Image (cartoon, rainbow, N blue to C red):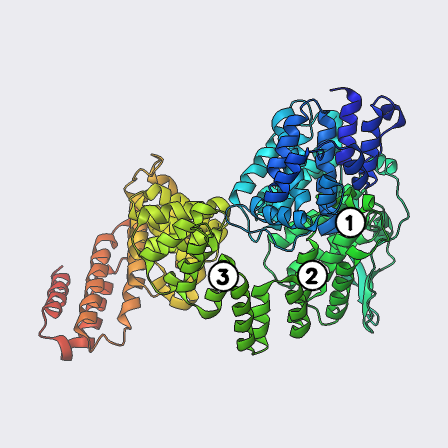
Amino acid sequence: MSAALRSAENALISNQKLDESIASQLATPIAETVQDILDGQYTKVLRERSLIFNGNNDQQKELQTSGDLDTYIDQQLDQQKDQDVFMLLATGIALLNAFVQTNWTGPLLDWNISELILGVKDQALDEKIHAYGLTSLSADSEQVYHLTQRLGLLTAARRILLHVRDNNNATLSTASFWAMRAVFIQQQLLDEHAGSLQELLLTLAKECNFEDEQKDLAIRLELELGLIYSYYGQDKEAFEKMKQAQTMSGFQWSLTGALGRRTKHQTFDVTQLVVLAESKEDEQKQEEVKETLRPETVELQDDTLLDHIAFTKTDQNDQEKEKRHGNLRVIDQCLLLAFCLNVKNTNPEHGLTSTEMAPYVTRVLENANNWMVHTMGLLHKTRLEAHKSRTVERSALQLQALVDQIKVEDSGVDERMAYFYDLLLPSKWDMERELAKRFVSLGVVRSALDIFERLEMYEEVVACYQMLEQPTKAKQVLERLMQESPDSPKLWCILGDVEQNPDHWRKAWEVSNHRFARAMRSLGAHLYREKDYDGCIDCYQKALAINPLFEGSWYVLGCAGMQAEQWEVSLRAFQRVVALDNEQAEAWNNLSSIYVHLDRKPDAFLALKQATKLKFDNWRMWQNMLIVAADVGQFADAIWAMQRIVELRWDKVREACVDTLVLQMLVDSVIQNWKDASDRDGARLQRQVQRLLEEVILARITNSPDIWRICAKFYLWQKRYSDALEASVKGYRAVMHDARLETDQEVFDRVASVALDTVDMYETLGEQEQDNAPVCQDWKYQARLILKGLMGKVRDIFEDTETYERLKERLDDLKRA
């Protein structure tokens, strides 16, 4: 392909006008087509320059009968094999952009696809093509929103762009990129995520390889791929792609603080969270900033809160002013909004997350250089303000203004489309649904109901009637819809959700010819609540075979498998959960339990390491970690696990937080120098065990004889004889004061055993030399004192017992000695 044609391709992706010198090297139709697409003149391209809709009468009649637009497009592609491949790509782009203009950006089109095919409007043909599109664009049993306008445009665009990609990918460097955009638009029409589309999107992205001079294309690719990952909930991968796009762009930004005030009557300065950002200087100068109309921005009418932060006059604020307010390249503003979205997706929903997101939006809105970027910034702002009492009204009004602007023609199609694919902007019906949900949150349920009824979102309609305490009307709505569409699996599912009747979900499954996965998901959830785990497993397996992109479904399947002791089923399920979301701590924990049952304890250990990393303060996971780590010989990790358990639980359960059997094992691993899982000497962990005993356990727990006994054994190995003897004595004192000593035979037996061990320790260590002196010169006296004290305390109660006789005999031995 010539350099001029490659530049024309690049221009269509990056929305940059062609240089006159390059345009002069292109054939006139190609140069004019590129210019028309950049100007938003898609109708002109499709009507005057595309040969794809020039079917013969037989083909047109066949299409009018079946509505099968894919077959019609394939016929045209076969007949036009000699057509310029670039013009085919341009046709696909024009169709895709026209579809987006209709359903996302506005202004609305005044023609239908039948006019492209027949030259005149044919409503019957448009309806058949629409019905066909509802089926052909569905994926993995997930349905297309049925009120999507001009579905034929996307059906045709997708077919053409995938055809160009399959047959001319070596010739056109951007064919896969445009095909990826078309498939992602298709995904956004569906009720839920579709696994087959996700796989196709990632395949198309891998096929996009851009050269060094195509840097603008590479930036957009990385950013759009980041948005795709974000859409599917893969936030880690999304962030990596966004960072790569930022590096390529040379864009620099940071989250920091600056002194300022947020309220009108504030008398002191507070550090405010702000984003400092700079575009790459040489490229920022190249980008022309146009003064154009902007979306309607609703002003804040509040007597206290300032609409913008009033920054304090300081040297630092003056130095950073340009970074706070200066102009940015539009693509860099798109990047900031993407990073803002990542903050939302990777943090819990509470005030702190909103506070962290706000500076990104503020920085973009300082000087948004594009209509749709400004729109996306305002949309983020409405979401952030929706839960604050002083801004909730402005939030709803602003969202209403954004919904209305799609019908307004005060900005050109070219500006609205220039950066559309670099923003995850909701479709017009999603925006209206968000507005309706905002009304519900404000208690304006009737207004929300009107919107949902107009959008024919019947699940939400039913929910609104239930909120209005009108269940009869909700049922009437469903009955009317069922009469109109008795074989709609979605309606049967909604009825099942309302009545909690499993027969309705089974009916939905039957009428869909066993293809409507939602029916099995709903039935599976019901059977799990009913503790029919085998039935639940069967339902979820059928649903996930159709559409595997449901993390929650895999999780419930795994839980049902564990309950039914179908370990292989639960193993596969939780492996899929962590593949879809690597930060699902509970899934990692459950996975470890399954590995234990399957006698794969090293795998269980690795799963628990991931679980405890994600839920650092969950003592139950650390308890599992402790047992498994000790079992597989990972003694260092077992020491760390025991430390975490003690730190998390000692103030609630005291000595019960220490598993003395495992603690004894850890001490023995050092004393006896056991080899660990990596064949390393156990004695190397001497310092860690000593720290665990002294700084973690004994610093908090001092009344456990078992812990003191283990300490004494450890000190004896270290030849710290005085410490060993002291630990033994403290262990005896810990049990000596048990209130049940004089009433409970078992308690007396246990205390007597500890007393005899302590006496033995006195005898063993008393005369040992340490620091040039005996450990305990009067050891006999101290030993006799212990025995006499205990015997005196229980003489009247347990004098005739065998244990008392043992104490007496030991005391006699000491006297003779």
Q: Label 3: which residue?
A: 486
- In this figure, which residue is indicated by the disc labeled 2? 432
Decide: is 402 above or below 276: below
Mark 3 vs 2, N-terminal side: 2
Q: Give coordinates of residue 233: x percent, y percent.
A: 57, 49
Residue 508 vs residue 323, the one in the foreground: 508
Q: Which residue is mark 1?
A: 109
Choose the circle earlier in sequence order: 2 or 1. 1
Asked if residue 405 lies left or right of residue 606, the reply is: right
Q: Earlier in the sequence, mark 1 or mark 3?
A: 1
Residue at position x 38%, y 45% in the image: 572
Q: Is residue 78 left or right of residue 734?
A: right
Q: Nearer the viewer, mark 3 or mark 2?
A: 3
For mark 3, give the secondary structure.
loop
In this view, 677 is above or below 432: above
Q: CA distance from mark 2 to mark 1?
A: 19 Å
Q: Tell me how far mark 3 sits from mark 2, CA to CA.
A: 28 Å
Residue type beneath disc 3: Pro
- Rendering coords of residue 254 (x, y %): 73, 47
Q: Nearer the viewer, mark 1 or mark 3?
A: 3
Is disc 2 surrounded by few (<14), some (14 to 19) or many (20+) residues within 10 Å? many
Q: Residues within 10 Å of mark 1 (few under 14, many from 20)?
A: few
Q: Position of residue 377 (x, y in %)?
A: 76, 54
Quick one: quadrant of the N terminus? top right
Residue 710, given in percent of the width and then of the height, sits at 30, 54
Q: Nearer the viewer, residue 682 or 116?
A: 116
